[in-house]
Image (cartoon, rainbow, N blue to C red):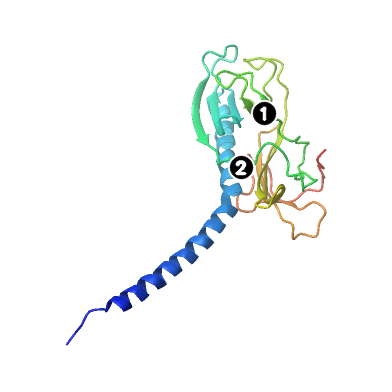
Amino acid sequence: MARGFSMVELLIVLTVITILLGISLFYLSGHERHYRPDEQALKIIDIFQEARQRSLTQRETMRVEIDLTDNMVRLIDENLPNTADDDRVIRSVVLISQAEVKLNSRPPDISTNPTEIMPVPIAQFRPSIYPPSVTHNVCTFRFQRNGTVVNEGTDAVGSNATTTGLTLFIWSPKPNNENESEIARAITVIGATGSVRFWEYNRNLTEANKWKDSRRMSIYGGQSGGSNTNTNAGS
């Protein structure tokens, strides 16, 4: 004659399930923390790439603002270049908390930049001169219809802007030391072409410069793949 489970047997099964679930959640949360710099980088790369494509196809200046004050990245169509009143936000993406993933500087424990075929200075965050982000702490880059990338210029319509690239670092600090990076990534944008590249920092490499082009994402913007020999050491 069939009988059901006893209370003791049910309690044992529930205890085993609870223990296994706790172990799974522990390891999953750890893996999730390690993937956050990659998630952040891919969000920003997606905006950069859309800005480049729109600028070329729509023949209009597309502005990207990485806003640390609002903790988001915006893609903005400047429309008419001689007025700031018609700027239109096409897309906004909320970024991961800056306590978990940092963007505003190179990790203190890393002394080199990714190597690129052209100089790509470290991205600068400063008070915005563009509405509605005026006075916010932002990094601003503007993708032009001719394929180049320029800085914010000197006023709200981008006067006196100059062609420039950027190296943007995305890194998570160690839980016990905020001045050391646990995971470090970087994005480079070539000012002359608008090409975008994703980099990973690998401490296990024997080379002096441990930044390597991420083969998961390859290269955007039409540049050929492969390594190069120019060293762009950070200042």
- Residue 57: x and y in percent read 54, 28
Q: Give x and y (percent) for residue 70.
A: 55, 30
Q: Disc 2 or disc 1, which is closer to the eye? A: 2
Looking at the rendered image, the quarter that the N terminus falls into is bottom left
Disc 2 crowd rating (10 Å Cα; few below 14, some 14-19, many 20+) is few
Q: Looking at numbered disc 1 in the image, what kind of residue is underneath it?
A: Val
Question: As displayed, is residue 68 above or below residue 7?
Answer: above
- Judging depth in this view, the residue of 227 and 184 nearest the camera is 184
The numbered mark at residue 149 is: 1
Q: Which residue is mark 2?
A: 99
- Work out which quarter of the rendered image holds the C terminus and state it: top right
Name the outermost residue toward the left: 1
> Residue 115: image x %, image y %?
77, 45
The image quadrant that residue 207 belongs to is bottom right
Residue type highlighted by circle 2: Ala
- 129 sits left or right of 25 in the view: right
Q: At 58% across and 37% down in the image, what residue appears?
A: 49
